[in-house]
Amino acid sequence: MLYVVSTPIGNLGDMTYRAVEVLKSVDLIACEDTRRTKILTHHYQVKAPLTSYYEYNKVIKGEYILKLLKSGKRIALVSDAGTPGISDPGFTLIKSALDAGVKVVSIPGPTALISALSISGFPTHRFIFEGFLPAKSGARKKELNNLKDLKVTVVLYESPHRILKTLEDMLDVLGNRPIAIVREVTKKFEEVVRGDIKTLLEKFKASKPKGEFVVIF
């Protein structure tokens, strides 16, 4: 059995009782970064061994994990933060397990996109999640142009070293429309800012952007 276990996106107190119980019961925990997951397992006194599973070893390590699953092992899949499979390589392992007839169980919990959307002030009854936009400006603008006229709320992830360029491209393609930006959601320096694109672009130009961003329009 493969357990897809959501873990805190910043605040360790957001871990669910069920998630802790599952991590204590499995034979192995597959995680993106063993160093980060050790902080979590140490905090909750979880003794299960860890193995790395991330973007650059997902094929080889995925085959190893799948072999263990097919032999009857109980394995938990976690990401660095949030729900596995959302903008991380977890999807590949989940799909392989399902294709092999392995039972996959969700242990729900935090995810940055829902947390940010819920406090954004934008409509939540219909929305689209685009994850990370392309790294190159040309491809990013093309994707933004595809989103430009949608009549739904759009949720994006962005990194601190690209947020300014992304906001500049958004201003160019989307025009100066209202947006919300949630930075470091659930963490010590959580910040929610709302306004038009131009105003928030100037704000983040004035001080070096830090942390992980969720952008909503």
Image (tube, rainbow, N blue to C red):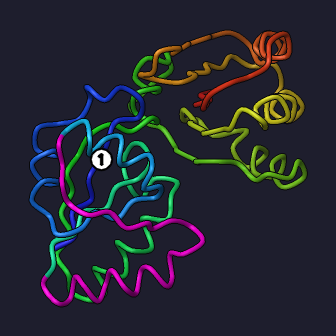
* x 37%, y 67%: residue: 51
x, y percentage for residue 130?
59, 48
Q: How many numbered discs sit on the rendered protein?
A: 1
Which picture quadrant has residue 183? top right
The quadrant of the image that shows the N terminus is bottom left
Q: Which residue is mark 1?
A: 6
Q: Is residue 7 magenta?
A: no
How busy is the neighbourhood of tag 1: few (under 14 within 10 Å), some, or many (20 plus)? many
Residue 48 is left or right of residue 58, and the answer is left
Relative horizontal placement of residue 37, taking residue 117 as reference (left or right): left
Callout 1: SS: loop
Q: Position of residue 207 (x, y in %)?
A: 80, 12
**Rendered image quadrant of residue 76:** bottom left
Q: Is residue 155 left or right of residue 165?
A: left
Q: Is residue 38 above or below residue 63?
A: above
Q: Which sits in the foreground, 25 or 49?
A: 49
Choose between 184 and 112: the one closer to the eye.
184
Up-down: is 50 above or below 93?
above
For the record, the magenta segment spans 45-72
Image quarter of the C terminus: top right
- Residue 77 in the image: state x and y as whole percent: 31, 62
Quarter holding residue 191: top right
In the rendered image, residue 156, in percent from the top left (x then y), is placed at 60, 39
Residue visible at 41% across and 35% down in the picture: 9
Identify whether 102 is placed above or below 203: below
Q: Is residue 86 above or below residue 56?
A: above
Residue at (37%, 48%) from the top-left corner? 37
Q: The disc labelled 1 sits on which kind of residue?
A: Ser
Residue at 33% from the left image edge and 80% from the top image edge: 65
